[in-house]
Amino acid sequence: MTVRPSLSDIKKCSTTYVLAINDALNVFQGKWKMPIIGVLLFGKKRFKEISHEIPKITPRMLSKELKDLEANGIVKRTVFNTMPVKVEYELTESGQSLHDVLEAMIEWGLDHRDRNIG
Protein backbone atom coordinates (compact mmCIF):
# COMPACT_ATOMS: atom_id res chain seq x y z
CA MET A 1 0.00 0.00 0.00
CA THR A 2 1.40 3.38 -1.03
CA VAL A 3 1.33 6.21 1.48
CA ARG A 4 0.12 9.45 -0.01
CA PRO A 5 2.14 12.51 1.02
CA SER A 6 0.31 15.11 3.07
CA LEU A 7 -0.83 18.35 1.44
CA SER A 8 1.73 20.28 3.49
CA ASP A 9 4.50 18.00 2.14
CA ILE A 10 3.18 18.43 -1.42
CA LYS A 11 3.21 22.21 -1.05
CA LYS A 12 6.93 22.05 -0.21
CA CYS A 13 7.74 20.54 -3.62
CA SER A 14 6.70 22.61 -6.61
CA THR A 15 6.98 19.65 -9.00
CA THR A 16 4.64 17.46 -6.96
CA TYR A 17 2.30 20.43 -6.47
CA VAL A 18 2.12 21.11 -10.22
CA LEU A 19 1.63 17.42 -11.02
CA ALA A 20 -1.29 17.23 -8.57
CA ILE A 21 -2.88 20.29 -10.18
CA ASN A 22 -2.40 18.74 -13.64
CA ASP A 23 -4.00 15.49 -12.48
CA ALA A 24 -7.08 17.40 -11.31
CA LEU A 25 -7.26 19.51 -14.46
CA ASN A 26 -6.97 16.43 -16.69
CA VAL A 27 -10.15 15.05 -15.14
CA PHE A 28 -12.05 18.35 -15.49
CA GLN A 29 -10.65 19.78 -18.70
CA GLY A 30 -13.21 21.08 -21.12
CA LYS A 31 -16.02 23.57 -21.10
CA TRP A 32 -18.82 21.28 -19.93
CA LYS A 33 -17.54 18.96 -17.20
CA MET A 34 -17.88 21.36 -14.27
CA PRO A 35 -21.41 22.46 -15.27
CA ILE A 36 -22.43 18.78 -15.53
CA ILE A 37 -21.01 18.12 -12.06
CA GLY A 38 -22.81 21.22 -10.79
CA VAL A 39 -26.13 19.93 -12.10
CA LEU A 40 -25.58 16.48 -10.60
CA LEU A 41 -24.73 17.95 -7.18
CA PHE A 42 -28.49 18.48 -6.87
CA GLY A 43 -29.20 14.76 -7.30
CA LYS A 44 -29.79 12.05 -9.88
CA LYS A 45 -30.77 13.22 -13.33
CA ARG A 46 -31.73 11.69 -16.64
CA PHE A 47 -29.92 12.71 -19.82
CA LYS A 48 -32.65 15.12 -20.99
CA GLU A 49 -32.83 16.75 -17.55
CA ILE A 50 -29.10 17.46 -17.61
CA SER A 51 -29.37 18.74 -21.17
CA HIS A 52 -32.17 21.16 -20.26
CA GLU A 53 -30.21 22.57 -17.32
CA ILE A 54 -27.08 23.33 -19.35
CA PRO A 55 -27.83 25.80 -22.14
CA LYS A 56 -26.07 25.29 -25.48
CA ILE A 57 -24.62 21.82 -24.77
CA THR A 58 -25.26 19.45 -27.65
CA PRO A 59 -26.47 15.89 -27.02
CA ARG A 60 -23.27 14.54 -28.59
CA MET A 61 -21.06 16.65 -26.30
CA LEU A 62 -23.12 15.80 -23.21
CA SER A 63 -22.81 12.10 -24.02
CA LYS A 64 -19.04 12.39 -24.51
CA GLU A 65 -18.51 14.36 -21.31
CA LEU A 66 -20.67 11.98 -19.25
CA LYS A 67 -18.62 9.03 -20.57
CA ASP A 68 -15.37 10.81 -19.65
CA LEU A 69 -16.64 11.64 -16.15
CA GLU A 70 -17.81 8.04 -15.72
CA ALA A 71 -14.40 6.72 -16.85
CA ASN A 72 -12.74 8.98 -14.26
CA GLY A 73 -14.98 7.76 -11.43
CA ILE A 74 -16.85 11.05 -10.99
CA VAL A 75 -20.24 10.02 -12.43
CA LYS A 76 -22.16 6.76 -12.06
CA ARG A 77 -24.53 5.67 -14.84
CA THR A 78 -27.41 3.37 -13.89
CA VAL A 79 -29.48 1.61 -16.55
CA PHE A 80 -32.93 0.36 -15.53
CA ASN A 81 -34.40 -2.61 -17.37
CA THR A 82 -37.70 -0.95 -18.24
CA MET A 83 -39.59 -0.23 -21.43
CA PRO A 84 -38.37 2.19 -22.60
CA VAL A 85 -34.96 1.86 -20.99
CA LYS A 86 -34.38 4.42 -18.23
CA VAL A 87 -30.88 5.75 -17.57
CA GLU A 88 -29.93 7.93 -14.60
CA TYR A 89 -26.70 9.74 -13.84
CA GLU A 90 -25.43 10.64 -10.40
CA LEU A 91 -22.19 11.65 -8.76
CA THR A 92 -20.05 8.99 -7.15
CA GLU A 93 -18.59 9.55 -3.69
CA SER A 94 -15.57 11.07 -5.40
CA GLY A 95 -17.85 13.35 -7.41
CA GLN A 96 -19.77 14.39 -4.30
CA SER A 97 -16.48 15.35 -2.66
CA LEU A 98 -16.19 18.16 -5.24
CA HIS A 99 -18.97 20.12 -3.54
CA ASP A 100 -16.55 22.31 -1.57
CA VAL A 101 -14.37 22.82 -4.66
CA LEU A 102 -17.35 24.09 -6.64
CA GLU A 103 -18.48 26.31 -3.75
CA ALA A 104 -14.99 27.87 -3.64
CA MET A 105 -15.02 28.37 -7.42
CA ILE A 106 -18.43 30.05 -7.25
CA GLU A 107 -17.26 32.41 -4.48
CA TRP A 108 -14.11 33.24 -6.42
CA GLY A 109 -16.08 33.78 -9.64
CA LEU A 110 -18.54 36.15 -7.96
CA ASP A 111 -15.71 38.13 -6.32
CA HIS A 112 -13.76 38.23 -9.59
CA ARG A 113 -16.80 39.47 -11.50
CA ASP A 114 -17.46 42.19 -8.92
CA ARG A 115 -13.83 43.39 -9.02
CA ASN A 116 -13.33 43.27 -12.76
CA ILE A 117 -16.73 43.83 -14.32
CA GLY A 118 -18.51 45.77 -11.61
Image (cartoon, rainbow, N blue to C red):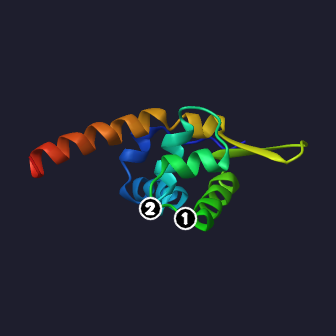
Question: Dot 2, crowdedness within 10 Å: few (<14), some or many (≥20)?
Answer: few
Single out the residue that lies furthest toward the bottom: 60
- Provide residue 77's location: percent of width, then percent of height: 74, 46
Figure quadrant of the N terminus: top right
- Provide residue 74's location: percent of width, then percent of height: 62, 46
Question: Is residue 99 positioned above or below 59 on the image?
Answer: above
Identify the residue shown where x is 36% and y is 56%: 14
Residue occupied by mark 1? 58
Q: How many marks?
A: 2
Foreground residue among 84 and 7: 84
Q: How far is disc 2 from disc 1 in space, using C-alphas?
A: 12 Å
Kindly indicate the quadrant of the structure image that contains residue 43: top right
Left or right for 56, reference 115 = right
Identify the residue shown where x is 65% and y is 61%: 63
- Provide residue 52's location: percent of width, then percent of height: 53, 49
Identity, as a three-letter code, of the amino acid under mark 1: Thr
Which secondary structure, mark 1?
loop
Left or right for 113, reference 16 = left
Which secondary structure, mark 2?
loop
Identity, as a three-letter code, of the amino acid under mark 2: Lys
Question: Dot 1, crowdedness within 10 Å: few (<14), some or many (≥20)?
Answer: few
Left or right for 116, reference 47 = left
Foreground residue among 25 and 43: 43
Q: Counting residues from the N terminus, which is met first, the one under dot 2 or under dot 1?
A: 2
Residue occupied by mark 2? 31
